[in-house]
Image (spheres, rainbow, N blue to C red):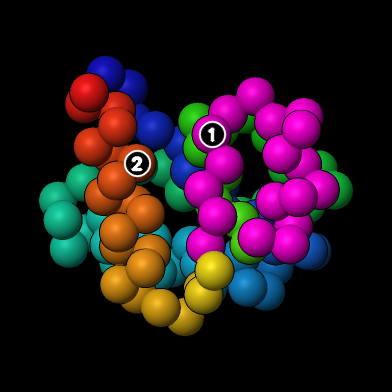
Amino acid sequence: MSVPKIQCVCGFGCGSSLMLRMAIDDVLKKNGLEAETFTGDVGTCLSNPCDVIFISRDLAERISDRAEVPIIIVDNFMDSSEIETHVTSYFNSLNS
């Protein structure tokens, strides 16, 4: 299986998405998982090749009807346990 590409999305692609990316990288390292993570903005994220998009609920509503990859909604970008739950669930779905 190839390494999944995880896109972390916020409004402009350089603020909260970077914090989310760093939190996801921490979860990956803690759990011995491998993925390529990168940030994107909500306006162009659908044109970036990826396997999954992590995004806030309000921004997800803007892309959900056009996304061709799974969208994972993160309610609190500062909640490491929520992020860990979403990341591990995503990886478990890959193994199913």
Q: Residues at badges 2 and 1 in contact (C-beta under 8 Å)?
A: yes
Give the amino acid at mark 2. Tyr
Residue 58, by quadrant, is: bottom right
Instruction: State which region is magenta.
Output: 57-74
Give me the residue at 14% from left, 51% from top: 32
24 above or below 16? Answer: above
Q: How far, Cα to Cα, is label 2 from label 1?
A: 9 Å
Q: Residue furthest right?
A: 43
Q: Residue furthest bottom?
A: 78
Q: Position of residue 71 (x, y in %)?
A: 57, 42
Q: Position of residue 8 (x, y in %)?
A: 57, 54
Q: Residues within 10 Å of mark 2 (few under 14, many from 20)?
A: some
Asked whether residue 59 is drawn in magenta, I would say yes
The residue wearing badge 1 is 70
Give me the residue at 63% from left, 62% from top: 56
50 above or below 18? Answer: above
For the N terminus, give its image quadrant.
Answer: top left
Asked whether residue 58 is drawn in magenta, I would say yes
Relative to 13, 21 lies left or right: left
Quick one: SS at disc 2? helix
Give the amino acid at mark 1. Pro
Looking at the image, is mark 2 or mark 1 earlier in the sequence? 1
The residue wearing badge 2 is 90
Give me the residue at 21% from left, 26% from top: 95
Q: Which mark is residue 93?
A: none
Question: Does residue 84 appear in the picture of this structure?
Answer: yes
